[in-house]
Image (cartoon, grey):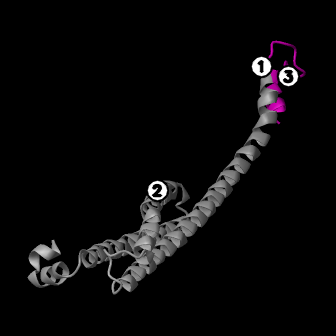
């Protein structure tokens, strides 16, 4: 699209070798990845905020989405390095020697992207572990409360069931039998 609109750029890129045009296209593609990585980083920062504010349950899904995005990005980026390295190192008459350093720069850009992606991957995995730990802690707290209630109510339930059996119970004919058994 840029070449269609800008005659100067079209002349510049099309007057050189096809390798020059290839370099420009690959450079544009790689540079377009940085805003996407920045978006993933912002999502990770948001998730971190929410996890430590107590929204662990809601963040399980968000963490999964970000992990999916990172995995898809990695799947796309991984095979590109070997292609770029082969373009930078192979001696061929299609790529002039004057362009070889530029293709080495593309390999460096690819490595920067990969390192940022790896950092994001490690961060989201750590956040996932932290989120799971916080969720487990909250569940354990709730289970402790339920256990306390169960321990308190179990003897009363057992006693009420024993009183419900059709057998003779001590003090059943007394005037205050109900209150005696209640105490």
Q: What are the residue bounds of the magenta stretch?
A: 162-183
Q: Is residue 52 visible?
A: no
Labels 1 & 2 near each other (Cβ < 8 A): no
Q: Which dot, 3 or 2, sits closer to the camera?
A: 2
C-alpha gap between disc 1 and disc 2: 58 Å
Query: Any mark on residue 71, and which?
Result: none
Circle 2 packing at 10 Å, graded few (<14), some (14-19), many (20+), is: few
| SS at badge 3 | loop
Q: Give the left or right position of residue 170, taking residue 78 as reference.
A: right
C-alpha gap between disc 1 and disc 3: 17 Å
107 and 177: which is toward the camera: 107
Circle 3 packing at 10 Å, graded few (<14), some (14-19), many (20+), is: few
The reply to whether the magenta stretch includes residue 164 is yes
Q: Which residue is mark 3?
A: 174
Question: From this viewpoint, which residue is outermost toward the right?
Answer: 170
Question: From this viewpoint, which residue is outermost toward the front?
Answer: 93
Q: Which secondary structure class fits the magenta region best?
A: loop
Q: Which residue is mark 1?
A: 164
| SS at badge 2 | helix
Question: Which residue occupies 79% across, 41% down?
Answer: 151
176 and 40: which is toward the camera: 40
112 and 79: which is toward the camera: 79
| SS at badge 1 | loop
Question: Which residue occupies 80% across, 16% down?
Answer: 165
Pinpoint residue 38: horizontal percent, then vertical percent.
Answer: 40, 74
Circle 1 packing at 10 Å, graded few (<14), some (14-19), many (20+), is: few
Query: Any mark on residue 68, and which?
Result: 2
Pinpoint residue 112: horizontal percent, then vertical percent.
Answer: 47, 78
């Amino acid at each position: 699209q840029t070449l269609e609109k800008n005659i100067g750029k079209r002349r510049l890129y099309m007057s050189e070798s096809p390798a020059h045009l290839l370099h420009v296209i690959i450079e544009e593609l790689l540079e377009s990845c940085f805003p996407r990585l920045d978006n993933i980083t912002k999502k990770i920062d948001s998730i971190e905020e929410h996890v430590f504010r107590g929204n662990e349950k809601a963040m399980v899904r968000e963490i999964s989405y970000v992990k999916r995005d990172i995995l898809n990005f990695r799947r796309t980026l991984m095979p590109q390095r070997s292609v770029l390295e082969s373009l930078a190192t192979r001696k061929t008459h299609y790529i002039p020697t004057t362009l070889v350093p530029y293709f080495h720069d593309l390999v460096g850009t690819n490595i920067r992207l990969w390192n940022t992606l790896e950092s994001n991957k490690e961060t989201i995995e750590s956040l996932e572990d932290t989120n799971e730990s916080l969720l487990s802690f909250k569940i354990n707290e709730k289970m402790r409360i339920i256990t306390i209630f169960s321990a308190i109510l179990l003897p009363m339930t057992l006693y009420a069931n024993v009183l419900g059996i059709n057998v003779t119970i001590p003090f059943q004919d007394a005037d205050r039998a109900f209150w005696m058994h209640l105490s």
